[in-house]
């Protein structure tokens, strides 16, 4: 048998071939004896794909995984795979994910295990089936838009994987979610200056909650994510130069395991300058901090600013409870109610305040630790008629 070669004169192995358009393929049989094909624009990992084609795994990398699966009796998947099996196979490729992400994956898997949709064969799923399932989750199951958005955010790329593997022609989830289910999400709203002032004054004057004043003041005036704030240690706070270093966050898993993780994105790593009043708040927190008998060490970090009654670092859940109880007490006293306030509302309010004060958007993006400036501009900053009127007068040089 003559030796077969590709267009670059390289020897092709058994099962390998190259189509007229230059794309490579590998033909094989799985453990069931079923014939399958995989494709790639690259034969070897170091090959460069043709212009306009996305980089992908080379054919020989795919072959290596296929041979491994066959030797270990792994069937793989085809159009007769169920939706649940497809999503599970897709998630097997997700390694090194954060625990919050893994928790979301488990959430989706558990839903598919209970749903008849999860037992459908992927080759039989039509777009109308996908839409009916999403509508059913909202109208019959009472799931919110954000929850459905999260579920679809896992199932959709799983089907995209099947399309990329040439098992499906179209992805049945390729449609805009808002055209199918009602977006009932409550948009985040920043506090007004007056609401922020009333909230902080109430905390400062309350016998019980005043102990949390400095921390909440810092959240309102730094825009820190709560996971970044609870992760701060004594070494991260530089009161001499009035700056704090943010290069990690503290999380606690459902099994109560504490973990130090990287910031939400590379842009989350930043050094934030702080004002003198924020610096004073940090000084009071450090001065009032009671050193435990044994400093807890999490991920090599020690000296956390706030510890709970068990001597362990406080986490986001602690502060969410404090905010909830503060709001409940305030609203039980005053007729003019405060809206729901959370640690994230503090971050949201800080960003809006800085934007309305005229801060350069790129500077604000840095301070917030946003990887994409569109998040800074579109998600957090909201313009009212009064702000628009003020800016218009400023641009035209009119008296305010």
Image (cartoon, rainbow, N blue to C red):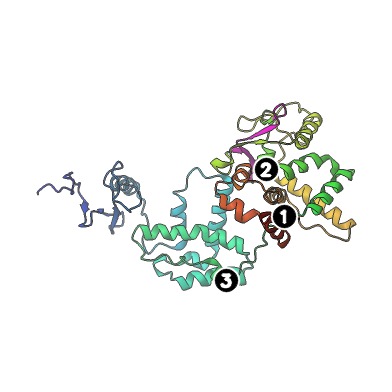
- Picture quadrant where residue 257 is located: top right
Mark 2 or mark 1, whichever is nearer to me: 1
Q: Which residue is mark 3?
A: 136
Residue nearer the viewer, 112 or 266: 266
Q: Which of the two labelled residues, at mark 2 and mark 1, occupies the earlier sequence position?
A: 1
Magenta stretch: give its range. 238-261
Q: Position of residue 183 (x, y in %)?
A: 61, 67
- Asked if the magenta segment contains residue 251, the reply would be yes
Callout 3: few (<14), some (14-19), or many (20+) C-alpha neighbours within 10 Å? some
Disc 2, SS: loop
Q: Image check: 303 left or right of 29?
A: right
Mark 1 or mark 3, whichever is nearer to me: 1
Q: Which residue is mark 2?
A: 224
Q: Is residue 214 visible?
A: yes
Disc number for residue 190: 1
- Asked if the magenta segment contains residue 332, the reply would be no
Please name the residue shown 86% across and 48% down the image.
202
Mark 2 or mark 3, whichever is nearer to me: 2
């Amino acid at each position: 048998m003559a030796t077969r070669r590709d267009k670059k004169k390289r020897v092709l192995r058994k099962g390998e071939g190259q189509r007229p358009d230059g794309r490579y393929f590998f033909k094989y049989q799985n453990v069931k004896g079923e014939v399958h094909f995989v494709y790639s624009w690259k034969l070897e990992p170091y090959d460069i794909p043709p212009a306009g084609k996305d980089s992908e795994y080379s054919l020989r990398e795919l072959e290596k995984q296929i041979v491994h699966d066959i030797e270990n009796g792994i069937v793989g998947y085809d159009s007769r795979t169920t939706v649940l099996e497809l999503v599970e196979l897709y998630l097997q490729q997700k390694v090194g994910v954060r625990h919050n992400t893994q928790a979301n994956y488990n959430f989706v898997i558990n839903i598919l295990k209970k749903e008849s949709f999860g037992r459908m064969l992927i080759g039989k799923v039509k777009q109308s089936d996908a839409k009916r399932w999403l509508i059913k989750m909202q109208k019959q199951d009472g799931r919110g838009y954000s929850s459905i958005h999260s579920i679809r955010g896992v199932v959709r790329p799983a089907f995209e994987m099947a399309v990329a593997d040439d098992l499906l022609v179209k992805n049945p989830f390729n449609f805009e979610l808002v055209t199918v289910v009602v977006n009932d999400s409550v948009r985040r709203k920043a506090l007004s200056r007056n609401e922020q002032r009333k909230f902080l004054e109430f905390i400062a004057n309350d016998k019980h909650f005043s102990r949390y004043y400095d921390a909440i003041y810092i959240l309102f005036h730094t825009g820190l994510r709560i996971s970044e704030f609870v992760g701060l240690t004594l070494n991260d706070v530089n009161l001499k130069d009035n700056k704090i270093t943010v290069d990690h966050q503290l999380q606690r898993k459902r099994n109560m395991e504490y973990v130090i993780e990287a910031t939400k994105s590379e842009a989350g790593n930043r050094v934030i300058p702080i004002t003198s009043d924020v610096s004073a708040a940090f000084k009071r927190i450090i001065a009032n901090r009671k050193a435990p008998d044994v400093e807890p060490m999490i991920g090599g970090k020690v000296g956390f600013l706030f510890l709970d009654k068990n001597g362990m670092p406080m986490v986001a859940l602690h502060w969410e409870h404090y905010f909830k109880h503060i709001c409940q007490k305030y609203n039980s006293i005053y007729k003019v109610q405060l809206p729901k306030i959370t640690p994230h509302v503090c971050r949201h309010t800080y960003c809006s305040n800085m934007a309305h004060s005229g801060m350069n958007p790129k500077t604000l993006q840095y301070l917030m630790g946003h990887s994409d400036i569109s998040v800074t501009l579109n998600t957090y900053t909201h313009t009212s008629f009064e702000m628009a009127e003020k800016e218009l007068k400023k641009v035209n040089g009119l008296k305010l």
